[in-house]
Image (cartoon, rainbow, N blue to C red):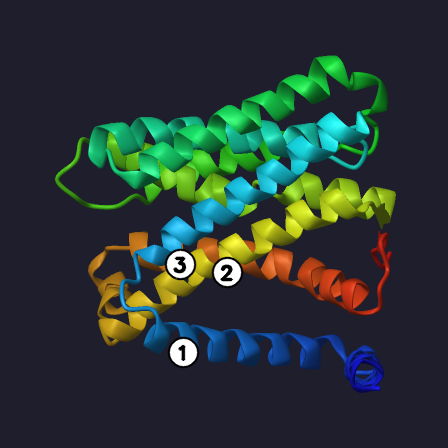
Amino acid sequence: MGKRRGVSAVNVVFGWLRQQSKMVKIALGVILSLILVVFLRFTVKNHNHFFVASELIHAAGIIILIYKLTRQKTCSGLSLKSQEVTAVFLAVRLICSINMEGDIHTVLDFATLVSTLWVIYMIRFKLKASYVKTLDNCHHYYVLVPSAILAFIIHPSSRYAYINRVMWAFCVYAESVSVLPQLRLMQNAQIIEPFTAHYVFALGIARFLACAHWLIQVFETRGHYLWLIGAGYFWFPVALLAEAVQTFILADFCYYYVKSAMEGQLVLKMPV
């Protein structure tokens, strides 16, 4: 009985949400996100763990893809272009990490890059018969070229070499929009099978944690970084905006993912 009431309550909540305007949904999403950020601020002592957790969840999403490709022998629903953009920014970030840090992030980036390259290999060669190229119609240069241009214009100011700072900025910008080809493919297909949905949801959680880290930095410095925008130091506000953009891009998908999961639907249907 308790379980039936719980499901009924969830259906009532999602039914009420469906009746609200898009602006109300956005406002509720922002409020809920801020509540979660405040909760994380006071429960997690070392806020650098957010980045580690983000990378681990991204890696978990890749593992889900590997399971799909090896067990189901199909790559339908996956965007090759999104995986290739991901491999590009991971490779660049790995080079930066080796030159600038050389810590746990380097290990995680290397493992994720190798896994992503394997996924690309499977889609391009082993399972290319199930890859629907016509649905994957968001070109690489829509994502990579603007990210590279913005990186040359706005990048962090630090003791590291100029090229490393530009490359790091490129990684942040490219990662923030790397999921666009995948979302475009899902919009074209309209129906998303479970493993692809799990993977994109994992990306959404990973980006939220990374965005939470930036927001907490603003809180702990009492907005100090944001005030630097007037002194010509645009890196932090733009990096924060990049994280917020990707989180916002994935928020709509995560809403429908949770809704479908609560209703027991295995296949996720996106609105037109």
Seen at 55% across and 59% down, the residue is 247
Picture quarter with the C terminus = bottom right
Seen at 33% across and 77% down, the residue is 42
Q: How many marks?
A: 3
Q: Residues within 10 Å of mark 3 (few under 14, many from 20)?
A: many
Q: Is residue 107 above or below residue 197?
A: above
| Mark 2–mark 3 distance (CA, rounded to whole Å) | 12 Å
Tag nearer the camera, 1 or 3:
1
Residue at the far left in the pictured view: 159
Question: Residue 159 occupies which quadrant of the picture?
Answer: top left
Seen at 30% across and 43% down, the residue is 155
Q: Amino acid at mark 1?
A: Val
- Foreground: 117 or 251? 117
Question: Residue 136 occupies which quadrant of the picture?
Answer: top right
Tag nearer the camera, 2 or 3:
2
Side (left or right) of 193 relative to 47? right
Q: Residue 22: where, in percent of width, then height?
A: 73, 75
Q: Residue 28: where, in percent of width, then height?
A: 62, 80
- Foreground: 22 or 125? 125
Residue underneath mark 3: 240
| Mark 1–mark 3 distance (CA, rounded to whole Å) | 17 Å
User: Which numbered circle lies on residue 38?
Assistant: 1
Q: Earlier in the sequence, mark 2 or mark 3?
A: 2
Q: Residues within 10 Å of mark 2 (few under 14, many from 20)?
A: many
Q: Residue 216: where, in percent of width, then height?
A: 33, 69
- Asked if labels 3 and 2 touch by Cβ distance under 8 angstroms, the answer is no
Q: Amino acid at mark 3?
A: Leu
Q: Earlier in the sequence, mark 1 or mark 2?
A: 1
Seen at 30% across and 74% down, the residue is 219
Q: Is residue 234 above or below residue 182?
A: below
Dot 2: what SS? Answer: helix
